[in-house]
Amino acid sequence: MLGMLALACADAELRFRTADIAAAMSAEALLGTDRTFQARLHEIRPHPGQVASAANLVRLMNGSGIVASHRHSHHAVQDSYSVRCSPQVAGAARDTLDHARRVAAVELASAVDNPVVLESGEVESTGTSTASHWLLPPTSWPSPRPRSARSRSGGSIGCSTRIF
């Protein structure tokens, strides 16, 4: 599962970059402005993902002839909300990705065995259902108890197989 998380994080990063590119292209296609993506506006609510996304949009739109062609237009109206809020939406997703990466980093640096065998030789369960005696040599395992089961005819069938 940890490997799947690491791969999902890498895939998500690519998708977030693609989302920023699509947002920048959409703003240009709609003759929008890059002013709403300026750092000073996003530092007021400094969510790290939002700030990163806005910075990407500024970088992507920097030097755009399309944006420059109408920058000082007197008839320009405010860009649609779906264009202006792109850093906030992508930023929340980026913040979630950062959390997933932190969790993955902790897990990658952790012992995830169960039970855990400490340096002293002590065996400690981490709270899941794995029986700690399974790590001990087979000679120290408890003896299986014979079990009996009733057959459909009502008779008894002896069974000495250990069921785990």
Image (spheres, helix red, strand yellow):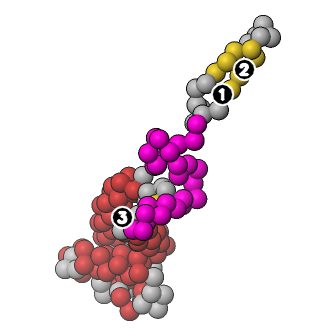
| Label 3 neighbour load within 10 Å: few <14, some 14-19, many 20+ | few
Q: Secondary structure at mark 2?
A: strand
Does the magenta stretch mainly form a helix, a strand or a loop? loop
Q: Position of residue 163 (x, y in %)?
A: 59, 32
Contact between labelled residues 2 and 1, with CB atoms less than 8 Å apart: no
Depth order, front residue of 2/77: 2
Looking at the rendered structure, which numbered label has been put on residue 146? 1
Residue 50 within the magenta-colored segment of the rendering: no
Q: Is residue 156 visible?
A: yes
Q: Secondary structure at mark 3?
A: helix
Which-is-in-front pick, marks 3 and 1? 1
Looking at numbered disc 1 in the image, what kind of residue is underneath it?
Pro
Depth order, front residue of 159/72: 159
According to the picture, the residue beneath numbered tag 3 turns out to be 108
Looking at numbered disc 2 in the image, what kind of residue is underneath it?
Ala
According to the picture, the residue beneath numbered tag 2 turns out to be 149
Looking at numbered disc 3 in the image, what kind of residue is underneath it?
Leu
Measure how far apart labels 3 and 1 are at the Cα level: 43 Å
Q: Quadrant of residue 160?
A: top right
Q: Residue at x 50, y 45 (%)?
A: 140
Query: In the rendered structure, which segment of residues is drawn in magenta?
Result: 117-143
Q: Quadrant of residue 156?
A: top right
Depth order, front residue of 131/127: 131
